[in-house]
Image (cartoon, grey):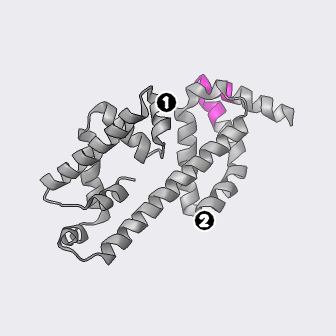
Amino acid sequence: MYDNIYIDKALFQRISEGDETAFGVLFNTSLQSLEPFIQKMVKSPESAKEVIQATFLRVWLSRDKLAEIDHPKAWLYKVAANECYTYLRKEATEYRLREAIAVTGNEADTVTRQLSLKELQAIIEEAVQLLSPQRRRIFQMSRNQGMKIPEIATALDLSPHSVKNALVISLKAIREHLRRYGHTIPLIYLVFLCK
């Protein structure tokens, strides 16, 4: 058992140095145990493949920190679980939005029903790109990576209050951008779309 820990730590050290071969070894040796774990959480082989890709992308993007990790397998499973959570939250958000649009009948929702979810998300993504770099980063850490306000504050060395304000301002800017396109989206829908 200790040999596996040292191999994993050595492998993480090599990956942290940019060794793509070591990354391939990690992928090939971990896939067999990670795939059933992920599939059990997301309930679909196709979804599991998407989450596996996201997991290993996260590992590669975090490679500069890998040498400091004491328990590589536990860390890898935590990353996989977080990616599953992010995927499931995104799926649930899209489902809730479709349900909310189908159920409501007021005039503000008439425009919403005419647009597909993808069109709305494209406009929202355009609005996100127009945010200042700091607000865009905070927004993406919150919505795309599923990070909580205190986690973002710690990662960016900001106060939680500053992070919360940036998120509020970002949502208002996105809503205003949608208005410029002639789309009045109730705030509750906007929150669902941006998750």
Asked if residue 63 is positioned above or below residue 127 in the image, the reply reads above
Q: Residue at x 48, y 42 (%)?
A: 147
Q: Does residue 109 appear left or right of residue 160 in this picture? A: left
| Type of secondary structure dominating the magenta stretch | helix
* Number of the front mark, 2 or 1: 1
**Among all residues in the image, which is located at the extreme front?**
161
Residue 35 forms part of the magenta stretch = no
Closest to the observer: 83 or 24? Answer: 83
Cα–Cα span, label 2 and label 1: 33 Å
Residue 19 visible in the snapshot = no
The amino acid sitting under disc 1 is Thr
Quadrant of the image occupied by residue 9: top right
On the question of residue 154 being in view, the answer is yes
- Label 1: which residue? 154
Q: For the point 35% across and 53% down, which residue is it?
A: 194
Q: Amino acid at mark 2?
A: Lys
Element marked by disc 1: helix
Q: Quadrant of residue 4?
A: top right
Relative to the observer, which residue lies in front, 191 or 5?
191
In this picture, is 88 found above or below 95? above
Q: Callout 2: 10 Å neighbours few (<14), some, many (20+)?
A: few
Give the magenta part as a residue range.
12-23
* Dot placed on the residue nearer the N-terminal end, 2 or 1: 2
Residue 53 point in image, percent of width and height: 54, 48
Q: 173 left or right of 4?
A: left
Residue 170: image quadrant is top left
**Which label is found at residue 43?**
2
Measured from the top left, where is residue 42 in percent x and y?
Answer: 58, 61
Seen at 61% across and 47% down, the residue is: 80
- Give the image location of residue 91, x and y in percent: 46, 61
